Amino acid sequence: MRTALCVRHEKTIYRLVWLNESKAGIYIGVLGSEQDSHISYHQDGTRHTKMGSEYHNRFSDVPISSHTGFRQLEHLSLSLTRNWFNAKTIYTGDARTESIVLLDERLFYDKDTLALDVWMTDRQSEQDLLESIAKHTLTRENFQVVTEFVSALEYFPNQKIALTLCSARVRGVDSSQLMFPPMCA
């Protein structure tokens, strides 16, 4: 399973985040920085972040198939400035991506930040996860929910992965640098 979360700006589609599952584990990647980066949760429980060729924050966790309940795996804060959207983030289709979620660019107008929360749940705890996400998003006054995405996993059939994306104006970036500037009146 490979899913891309994208946004269309004018006629160009940009990939914000990709999610991949294989027998080896679950991978969530972001594009746009100088280095490609992704977080990994391997089937044996090994977790890490990879930026370019370097590994960071390596540790052992519960194997994916043994995971019970729900919990947040990661929080990422992505810049919505013009320099983040470049040739590396343009999505033109590829042989590996099976699904895309295309977000409306108006959800990003006058925002400088995309907050991405990554969650894992077992199937029995999915409703508890969704209720917890709802409570979590209500406490973040400056953040607008863009999408909540939940997907079953093929290789780990008792688990699901969830992504919560919120946009915000919290970095104090000048409007001229925003990819999605304020709408004209």
Image (cartoon, rainbow, N blue to C red):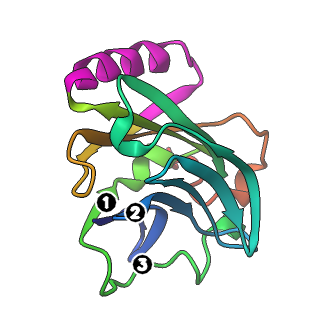
Q: Mark 3 points at which residue?
A: 91
Range of magenta residues? 124-145
Above or below, 57 against 122 in this view is: below
- The label on residue 102 is 1
Q: Distance between the residues labelled 2 and 3?
A: 8 Å
* C-alpha separation, residue under disc 1 versus residue under disc 3: 11 Å
**Mark 2–mark 1 contact, CB under 8 Å?**
yes
Circle 1: is it few (<14), some (14-19), or many (20+) Cα within 10 Å? some
Disc 2 element: strand
Q: Name which residue lies at 62% across and 44% down.
A: 76
Left/right of residue 55 with respect to residue 43 in the rendered view: right
Q: Position of residue 55 (x, y in %)?
A: 74, 62
Q: Earlier in the sequence, mark 1 or mark 3?
A: 3
Q: Mark 2 points at which residue?
A: 6
Q: How far apart are marks 2 and 1 (CA)?
A: 5 Å
**Residue nearest the viewer, comparing 127 with 133:** 127
Report the amino acid beneath label 2.
Answer: Cys
Q: What element carries label 1?
A: strand
For this rendering, which residue is in front, 152 or 102? 152
